[in-house]
Amino acid sequence: MSVTDTTPELTIDADRLWSDLMELAAIGAYDDEATGLVGVNRQSLTDEDRAGRELLLSWMEELDLGITVDEMGTIFGRREGQDPELAPVLIGSHIDTVATAGAFDGCLGVLGGLAVLRSFDEAGLRPRRPIVVAAWTEEEGVRFGTDMLGSAVAAGRLSLDHAYGLTDAEGHRLGDELERIGFKGERPVRLDPPHAYLECHIEQGPVLAQEDRQIGVVTGVQSISWQKVTLHGRAAHAGTTPTELRIDAGLAAAQIIVEVRRMVDSGAYGRLRATVGHIGASPGLPSVVPDRAEITVDLRNPDDEDMARAEADLAEFLDRLPTSQPGLRVETAQMARTKAVPFSEAVQDTIETAAKDRGYDSMRIMSGAGHDAQEMAAIAPAAMVFVRGQHQGISHNPREYSTPEDCAAGIEVLASAVKELSA
Ligand code: HGY
Ligand code: MN
Ligand code: MN
């Protein structure tokens, strides 16, 4: 599909996009000790998220969009097309963040979606199809434990009741938090399939910069497995308790951490990546052997079979763990699990042609991170535009940074691809 045609080229107001990104990033801003930078902590359904949502609504009202909020709190802003009966082109991402975020993860795709609509208005262009911008609830999953949650419920992979019942570390239910911040919407959550779904997102990795490409045409997302492992041992005095009488939950946690890295290094599971991001031990006192430890294990793999084998072998390792400390109890809980998802070739081609027509170097790239686009791919042709990151593409960290030019390039490509798909 080629986007070259007689209608005017869509121009993106890069300054407005940048100032919107910075204005949204100020909500939930905090002084990050580790980096000395200002980070962003705007976790889903917190007061900060409510403030971010309200700012987004003000920008959607400014654009005179038809605004709806679904039962999961996902916000949709709709620009009607010439034929309102046609299925819309859906674009968007998320504005919830991890606790130590930068200004770009997710926000670029939502605010960039508004920039695309402004460019259509600027050009006096009214396509046949409606265009809708979405801000998905709880994409990060760091507060309620399951990522891509709002889009997974919209696509029907997870149920609304299951999502409402998820709780945060303090025991707050997601359904109650939606109510509390006033974003438990009326719109039925199951989404009618859009004509296509496009998401512009920072790459969050080093590849585009290493290959000196401005744009990534995303081919798909790797599989993701999140589980929480709780180890139950026996508290004891650190000085008086002989080693052979201990059931040390902290030791068991350490053994798991070493084991998942051994699995990665073994090469027996393809391009497996493993991360133990949360490590907690209680009572957490220097002179007490921990009676309880809790860790999260995040596994990623582009190959579903390699992932399944890694999960099975890890489960076996956990089963065997008590033999080294009789009396140890191991409890596991799956938090999130998604298969590898390929994106639509046709939509990838449209993105690649859009990048070429705009004079940007692009490359096909698989996503290491999960995204809402992978949920939309289950109900519509979907693909993503990646934007190059600085500092080796570091993300989920206040050092996350993409230049104003690269952000604008990604949204220009998005605009051209949307123009093609909504024509
Ligand atoms: O975890 C992820 O890959 C995404 O940032 N939610
Ligand atoms: Mn994201
Ligand atoms: Mn993220």
Image (cartoon, rainbow, N blue to C red):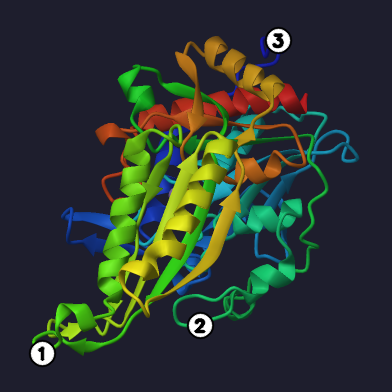
Q: Amino acid at mark 1?
A: Thr
User: In front: 400, or 50?
Assistant: 400
Q: Can you tell which quarter of the image residue 380 is in?
A: top right
**x, y percent for residue 65:** 70, 50
Q: Secondary structure at mark 2?
A: loop
**x, y percent for residue 27:** 39, 62
Q: Amino acid at mark 2?
A: Gly
Q: Residues within 10 Å of mark 1 (few under 14, many from 20)?
A: few
Q: Amino acid at mark 3?
A: Asp
Give the labeled residue for mark 3: 5
Q: Identify the disc placed on residue 171.
A: 2
Asked whether disc 1 touches disc 2, contact meaning CB atoms under 8 Å apart, the reply is: no
Asked whether disc 2 touches disc 3, contact meaning CB atoms under 8 Å apart, the reply is: no
| Depicted 38 relative to depicted 88: above or below | below
Give the labeled residue for mark 1: 240
**x, y percent for residue 308:** 56, 45
Look at discs 1 and 2 and give the one toward the viewer. Answer: 1
Q: Can you tell which quarter of the image residue 250 is in?
A: bottom left
Distance from Cα at disc 2 to Cα at disc 3:
55 Å
**x, y percent for residue 422:** 76, 28
Residue positioned most to the left: 239
| Depicted 207 relative to depicted 352: above or below | below
Q: Earlier in the sequence, mark 1 or mark 3?
A: 3
Q: Earlier in the sequence, mark 1 or mark 2?
A: 2
Distance from Cα at disc 1 to Cα at disc 3:
81 Å
Q: Secondary structure at mark 3?
A: loop
